[in-house]
Amino acid sequence: MSDDVRQQMIDDDHEDLTHWAQKMRKEPAPPSPHQPRLKPQSKIRGKARTARLVKTDDPEMASKEDDTPGKRGEKARPTAAANDSLKALQGRLIVDESQPFYLLSPEGLVLLVNEAYQKLLSACDGRKPGPGMIKSGAFVPSDYLDLLDRVLSARETLMTEDWLSLDGKSRCWRGRHFPLCDDAGHVQAVGGVYTDVTADLGLRRDAVLSRQRFNDFARATSDWFWETDRDGHLTLLSDRFVASIGYPSAAFYGRPLAALASLDDEDASAYDLVENLEKALESRAPFRGLELEAQAADGRKLRFSLSAVPIFDSLDGAFMGYRGAGMDVTDLYHKSVQSLEMQRDLEATLEELTRKNLELDIASAQAESALRAKNEFLAAMSHELRTPLNAIIGFAESMEMAVFGPLDAKYRTYSKDIVGAGRHLLSLINDVLDVAVLDSDGVSLHIEPLSLKQLLEQAASLVAIRAKDRKLDLSELALESDAIIACDDRRTTQILLNLLTNALKFTPEGGRIGADLECRDGKAMLIIWDTGIGIAPAMQDKVFDKFQQVAETIYSRKSDGAGLGLHISRELARLMGGDITLQSKEGSGSRFTIILPLADTEQP
């Protein structure tokens, strides 16, 4: 145990003892409960327990020749007067027999010791407390004379602590050494009482260590601590608060806890915080997370979060105040404010996006309505146009065939031109109608197992005459193998016819058009190839778009068509679970691959 801790414990236990030499006629000072007292001669109430004089048969107690008291260090024979004085002093002492006690003359002569002191000396393994002896009539050792002289000179109680080894265990005994005076104020004797304070020292040591531990925690944490009395006035503020706010803690002592707050007339929320805090304090219940805004000495606004518990007296339960902690949440508060601002901005942005999306939905609905109206118009117009157009084509064919009689050669040429132009116009009308139906998701398909070889032969027969006129070789369109595909008969024939027609358009005279067939992964892949002039790489991604014809190239307006055939063909193939791809090299022809699913009977 450190000297500082021991001294602190001694100071805590030290009591201001009054002199025993006050005259009995005067009003005596209040006696201390921890030391023996002299009974007044004039007023003795009750029968007090007195220390018992320990007798001894030691022959050295006898004096040789002289009856006068000897010097210090010598043995003396008590005279009759001395015995009478000792008996009178003994009769006036009130001593607790359970505590070790001794009584000495001012010269250092052992007058009496009690049994408790005897037992203490007998149990000591080494050094002994006080005079260290139990022989009445003997003088104390020289090493005790210094303490005796100090008591006599100071005429007041002196405190000592002795760590003694008792039966192998270390114990602390606190001694109170005091003068005993007669009615005239003369020192008649010096007494001493010993108390075992080992347990008290342990408790106080634990209390000191506990407080030191608490102080270490308080210094290590960023929180600060506070305390109020029962009236809500501050009685304690830790150093951490002083470091945070820049004002001395004494400036707030005796003031309400709410006095820490900085109130701003322009900020009503500060008043709300104080009001919430005052309500919590009035409730005398624990609270947590109540915020308070304070202004530091440098003008900064600080935000603190306060938590506390009420204190009640352990004896009568009376409310004694609050103890609590404060945490600096300034940075957290500013971040939360920024977060709220960002949240408000995001909510405003989301609201704006929602409004724009609603406008887009309305616009999209209007566009879909317009598209449906367009498709319906195109479908209606196509139907209305095809009826008279078929009549025109029919009459022109009749004239060309001279059904009603021979015609002049020039008129026959005119009728042939009418038939060609009518058929071309009818093809355009059909393509426009197909696009309108595709855009409105109005295509109906009848899927069934069909022979791909037969479908290709039918489409080839429809273009055979034109191919012959252009001197194109179609012999390689004949497939060596066949595949049964799941498709719509009319739409598949339309796809094949569109691809063969394109090959006829862009393959020079004397060229070749053919087909190859591959089957894998449940798909039939029919490749329609030609030896035409091919398609430039930059245009290969565009040929499947609507109305796509490239000016001044093979897809210029010099060729027939509106640029819808490839778009319609690919969309129809996709509706049947397939697709169309292109491979082409400018000047070396093109390869269009039609991918369609095999029928279940053909799949492995």
Image: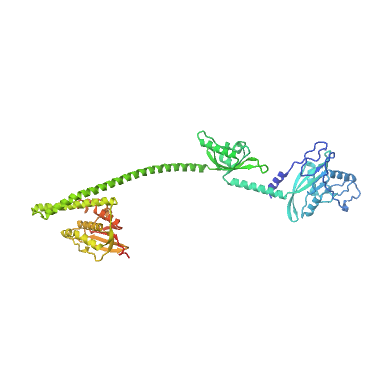
**Residue 297 image position (x, y, % from top left):** 55, 37
* Residue closest to the far top: 265
Q: How many marks?
A: 0
The foreground one among 149 and 214 is 214
Quadrant in the rendering for residue 22 = top right
Query: Horizontal placement of 497 versus 174: left or right?
Result: left
**Residue 303 image position (x, y, % from top left):** 53, 40
Note whether 82 is above or below 536 in the view shown: above
The foreground one among 252 and 325 is 325
Q: How is the image coloured?
A: rainbow
Instruction: Look at the image and tell me whether residue 479 can be seen.
Output: yes
Query: Horizontal placement of 283 versus 437: left or right?
Result: right
Q: Quadrant of the C terminus?
A: bottom left
**Residue 459 image position (x, y, % from top left):** 21, 59
Note whether 67 is above or below 536 in the view shown: above
Residue at screen point 58% across, 47% down: 220
Query: Horizontal placement of 139 versus 13: left or right?
Result: right
**Residue 305 image position (x, y, % from top left):** 55, 42
